[in-house]
Image (spheres, rainbow, N blue to C red):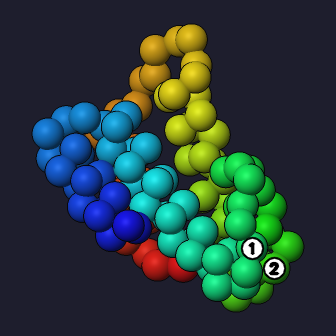
Amino acid sequence: MAELKRQRAQALFENDFFEESIVSSYTSRFQAARALLFHDGVIEKSHACVVAYLREHYSSALGQDKINWLDTYRLERHESFYGLEKSNVDEHEAEDALEKSKKSF
């Protein structure tokens, strides 16, 4: 699932759907993170719970930067889905998210 979402993010980026590309980039890493939880026998109840679990159990193994990235784009995804204002995502931000989504957990 993670790879499928990463490929979707790439296609969206190539067609100038930058906000949607960021959401798919995030979803790619979210799915990879969920796999870690499932491996540990944990079923998450929310996107925020996944980040909290990674901080508690995988900070040294993954590095805080990857977990912070996931959390940053978790908030961006939330704003994209539920926010009331137009998002101003540019090509560079979407490209950065896409590149980060290629780095595996």
Residue at 74 percent of width and 73 percent of height: 42
Tag 2: amino acid: His
Query: Image height check: is 64 above or below 13?
Result: below
Q: Identify the element where label 1 is drawn.
A: loop
Q: Looking at the image, which is closer to me, 57 or 87?
A: 57
Residue 69, horizontal then vertical, whole percent: 60, 58
Q: Quadrant of the N terminus?
A: bottom left
Quarter residue 65 falls in: bottom right
Quarter residue 19 falls in: top left
Query: Image height check: is 93 above or below 25?
Result: above
The residue where tag 1 is placed is 42
Instruction: Determine whether, in the image, residue 92 is placed left or right of residue 88.
Output: left
Q: Which one is closest to the eye, mark 2 or mark 1?
A: 1
Instruction: Determine whether, in the image, residue 19 is placed left or right of residue 52.
Output: left
Residue 105, horizontal then vertical, whole percent: 54, 79
Q: Identify the element where label 2 is drawn.
A: helix
Q: Which mark is residue 26?
A: none
Residue 33, horizontal then vertical, whole percent: 59, 70
Residue at 60 percent of width and 58 percent of height: 70
Residue 63 shows in the view: no
Tag 1: amino acid: Val
Q: Which mark is residue 57?
A: 2
Q: Looking at the image, which is closer to me, 35 or 91?
A: 35
Query: Image height check: is 74 above or below 17?
Result: below
Residue at 44 percent of width and 75 percent of height: 103
Residue at 50 percent of width and 65 percent of height: 31
Residue 53, horizontal then vertical, whole percent: 79, 68
Quarter residue 51 falls in: bottom right
Measured Cα–Cα span from mark 2 to mark 1? 12 Å
Q: Residues within 10 Å of mark 2 (few under 14, many from 20)?
A: few
